[in-house]
Image (tube, grey):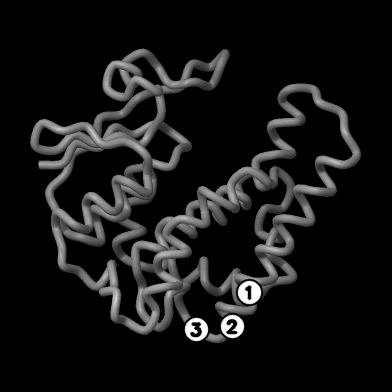
Amino acid sequence: MVTIHHLERSRSDRIIWLCEELGIDYDITHHQRDPATMRASTTLWAVNPLGKSPAIEHQGQVVFESGAIIEYLLSTFGPTSLSPSPDAEGYIDYLQWLHAPEATMTLPILMPMICGTMGIESELLPLFADSETQTMYRYLNSELTQRDYIAGGDFTAADIMLSYTLMMAQALATSEPEKVFFEYPALTAYLSRLRARPAYQSASAKF
């Protein structure tokens, strides 16, 4: 049994979805955010010393960091089509997009919110963040015009990693989030395909 330590509005959404796609037994321990600081409660810190979600427990081990958890679960419960083999045509794209959402995409998406929360007034930072995000969106839209999923014709765990970041961008747009990707119809269609997956719908009821 896999225990998922889930924090509201966090990357642990990815892990619940992955477990649904894999069809494995799991349970969820819910943790709350401190309304004053929006940090995790002490119950989560007791599991993950960094106080971050997701974290999982499995066979006496604690694993944190969503990308690491995804790789751990895929290797533990695979082989699975969610993780293409190194000789597969889309393997490089799969590998890149398994890591790019956190390594490249997240910071510029979050930067305007962080600046606003901290009271940082800057003309350059929002411009830099917007330039970075639009560059990524244009590239993704171009790639997804040619294929249904980010690593090719088949859905993989890289789509789970990527989609959370894109959905986060929508969620941060407090005004008309559906228009975040208005100029990128392939991105919009991609997210609609992912949200229509039965496993995503089952998972989202538990987020």
> Helix, strand, or loop for circle 1?
helix
Q: What element carries label 2?
A: helix
The Cα–Cα distance between marks 2 and 1, rounded to whole angstroms, is: 6 Å
Which residue: 20% across, 60% down?
22
Residue picked out by circle 1: 141
Q: Report x, y in % for residue 190.
A: 52, 72
Q: Is residue 4 above or below residue 143?
A: above
Q: Could you say which is closer to the camera, residue 63 or residue 187?
A: 63
Dot 1 crowding, Cα within 10 Å, few <14, some 14–19, many 20+: many
Q: What residue type is labelled 1?
A: Asn
| Residue at image location 75% in from the left, 31% down from the top | 115
Q: Percent x, y for residue 130?
A: 78, 52
For residue 178, the mark is none
User: Which mark is drawn over residue 147?
Assistant: 3
Q: Which residue is drawn at 79% across and 22% down?
A: 119
The residue furthest front is: 87
Indicate the amino acid at tag 3.
Arg
Q: Specify whether 187 is left or right of 126.
A: left
